[in-house]
Image (cartoon, rainbow, N blue to C red):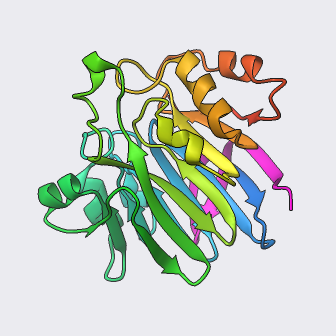
């Protein structure tokens, strides 16, 4: 079943469990026919709403006041850099039943969280599964930013629809092993993650039907869209500077 984008809006007033906000969002119908709502906060911070769950990815107070948001059901942390790990945002968003998923370094800093390592798979709900995948730098002078095996990217399987959140990474060889990815988030900012050329190379390693550049600061990501126009990849540019 082909994914279908049913609604796009820029600076739309929308609701998460009764709370109203002004952010750009997309709604995608997943393979099991349910709505996946993606909210684009900023940089590496995202929100996924699916099957009555709110999933926060790398929430950081610098980008938004999370005190105005409802409690998260799940919080995913890719790694411990301060533009991805914010203990204040995590505490604000956490409730009694919130599941905090981290790498080992984040767990040590926060003193809490379920540790996932590259290759681990867990179930978040009967129809929602999470896999941790590698995220690291390969360019020699950049390897210390994100060393191999430390950080996580994530593949969220939401009722059969696979969403790849790459985290901070370059176009690593493991991307060739990605299969059946429906939606991908690939980072674009130097010297920490990928150049435009690397993002294009990464996309061509596994050809996601939908690609969102994120984490891109002031990079002109329209070049990605123009370059991949004949690659059967729908590049969607949202406000993620």
Number of numbered callouts drawn: 0
Percent from the top left, x then y, of residue 155?
Answer: 53, 57
Question: Is 121 drawn above or below residue 163 in the view shown?
Answer: below
Q: Residue at x 69, y 69 (%)?
A: 160
Q: Residue at x 40, y 40 (%)?
A: 63
Q: Residue at x 47, y 54 (%)?
A: 154
Residue 193 inside the magenta-drawn segment: no
| Residue segment shown in magenta | 1-25
Q: Is residue 72 visible?
A: no
Q: Main secondary structure of the magenta part?
A: strand
Question: Is 28 drawn above or below residue 185 in the view shown?
Answer: below
Q: Nearer the viewer, residue 77 or 205?
A: 205
Residue 68: name its quadrant. Answer: bottom left
Residue 20 inside the magenta-drawn segment: yes
Residue 44: name its quadrant. Answer: top left
Is 155 situated left or right of 28 in this image? left
Q: Nearer the viewer, residue 9 or 145?
A: 145
Q: Residue at x 35, y 20 (%)?
A: 139
Considering the image in quadrants, where does the N terminus appear? bottom right
Percent from the top left, x then y, of residue 200?
Answer: 63, 24
Residue 95: name its quadrant. Answer: bottom left
Q: Is residue 124 visible?
A: yes
Percent from the top left, x then y, of residue 7?
Answer: 80, 51
């Amino acid at each position: 079943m082909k994914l279908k984008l049913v609604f796009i809006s820029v600076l739309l007033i929308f609701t998460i469990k009764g709370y109203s906000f002004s952010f750009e969002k997309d709604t995608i119908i997943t393979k099991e026919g349910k709505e996946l709502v993606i909210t684009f906060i900023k940089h590496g911070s995202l929100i996924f709403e699916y099957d009555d769950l709110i999933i926060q990815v790398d929430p950081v107070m610098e980008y938004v006041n999370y005190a105005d948001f409802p409690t998260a059901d799940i919080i995913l942390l890719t790694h411990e850099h301060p533009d991805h790990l914010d203990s204040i945002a995590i505490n604000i968003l956490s409730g009694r039943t919130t599941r905090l998923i981290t790498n080992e370094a984040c767990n040590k800093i926060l003193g809490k969280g379920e540790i996932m390592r590259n290759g681990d798979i867990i179930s978040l709900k009967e129809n929602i599964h999470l896999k941790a995948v590698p995220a690291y730098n390969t360019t020699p002078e950049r390897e210390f930013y994100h060393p191999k095996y430390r950080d996580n990217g994530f593949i969220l399987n939401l009722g059969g629809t696979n969403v790849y959140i790459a985290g901070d990474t370059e176009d690593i060889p493991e991307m060739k092993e990605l299969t059946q990815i429906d939606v991908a988030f690939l980072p674009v900012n130097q010297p920490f993650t990928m150049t435009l050329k690397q993002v294009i190379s990464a996309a061509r390693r596994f050809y996601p039907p939908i690609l969102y550049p994120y984490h891109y600061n002031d990079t002109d990501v329209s070049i990605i869209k123009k370059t991949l126009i004949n690659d059967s990849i729908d590049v969607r540019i949202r406000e993620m500077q």
